[in-house]
Image (tube, grey):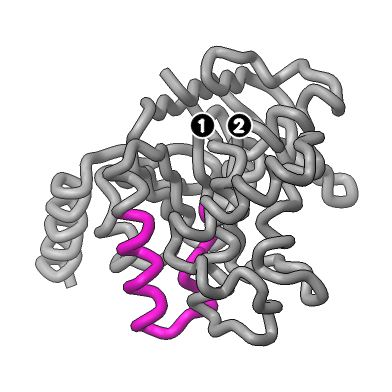
Amino acid sequence: MLIRLRDVERVYKVGVERVHALDGVTLDVAANEYVAVMGPSGSGKSTLMNVLGCLDRPTAGLYELDGTNTTRMGAGALARVRNQRVGVVFQSFELLPRLSALKNVELPLIYAGIGWLGRRRRARTALERVGLADRAHHRPNQLSGGQKQRVAVARALVNNPAILLADEPTGNLDSRASAAILELFDELHRQGQTILIVTHEDEVAACCRRVVRLRDGEVASDLPIERDAAARRGAGAAMEATS
């Protein structure tokens, strides 16, 4: 199992209160799955992504990534896992404005200690993979929103991560650019990439193969896309019947 969460909690202190952002989450994700994580605001979606991406630590519980227990790792070891085993795509792209697309993609390789020639070769390959080889020397302000997101995807892929995490990856894009990014994710999934997308959009979730829904920090449902859609239709019909 690529991802294994067992009874994961993440508690934050807000003044004298304790807020359970995650409250006993148990979840498995196998290699080459394509999963959407959905839920209302405050349901724990972003906290779950931060835990999966090793950007945050659980307060309690177990998180294993590709057989490695990350829960008790020191900061240095956790940073290496984050750099080498996880790729993250953000809604706001997070590109450095003064660097070209190629140099933005090279950044994770610099942190991994890869030499100049290897960095350049792998970054070019990653840009080719997302269809942006001809924009390698353009800076972010010379790229469209969809192209910026493709650069961000290339950067996330450049270290051949075990899992690609995307946080609202179409949130800042128009409908045409959104469709192109989702087509790219679908192609990456066909190539064998494990992908987990945090989204509030049903249209985005419909492109995945499985939907995990959170509510109040807990897993409310975990269904294949067809059964999730049927469950939502059934819930809607029940609400109409009682209204």
- Is residue 171 highlighted in magenta? yes
The residues bearing labels 1 and 2 have C-alpha atoms spaced at a distance of 5 Å
Magenta region, residue range: 166-186
On screen, residue 228 versus residue 105, left or right, reads left
Does residue 183 appear in this view?
yes
The furthest residue to the right: 15
**Which residue lies under the disc numbered 2?**
85
Q: Judge the density around disc 1: few (<14), some (14-19), many (≥20) Cα neighbours within 10 Å.
A: many
Tell me where residue 18 sits by quadrant. Answer: top right
Mark sitting on residue 63: none
Residue shown at 72%/71% (left/top)?
Answer: 100
Q: Are marks 1 and 2 in contact (CB under 8 Å)?
A: yes
Question: Which amino acid is tagged 1?
Answer: Ala
Q: How many marks?
A: 2
Tell me where residue 30 sits by quadrant. Answer: top left
Secondary structure of residue under mark 2? helix
Residue closer to the observer: 34 or 95? 95
Residue shown at 61%/69% (left/top)?
Answer: 136
Residue shown at 70%/20% (left/top)?
Answer: 71
Q: Judge the density around disc 2: few (<14), some (14-19), many (≥20) Cα neighbours within 10 Å.
A: many
Relative to residue 57, is residue 188 depicted above or below? Answer: below
Residue shown at 58%/34% (left/top)?
Answer: 23
Q: What percent of the width, then of the height, locates residue 107?
A: 75, 52
Residue closer to the observer: 229 or 174? 174
- Is residue 233 highlighted in magenta? no
Question: Which amino acid is tagged 2?
Answer: Arg
Tell me where residue 38 sits by quadrant. Answer: bottom left
Does residue 44 appear in this view?
no
Q: What percent of the width, then of the height, locates residue 152?
A: 59, 61
Mark closest to the chain's N terminus, 1 or 2: 2
Relative to residue 222, is residue 37 depicted above or below? Answer: below
**Which residue lies under the disc numbered 1?**
162
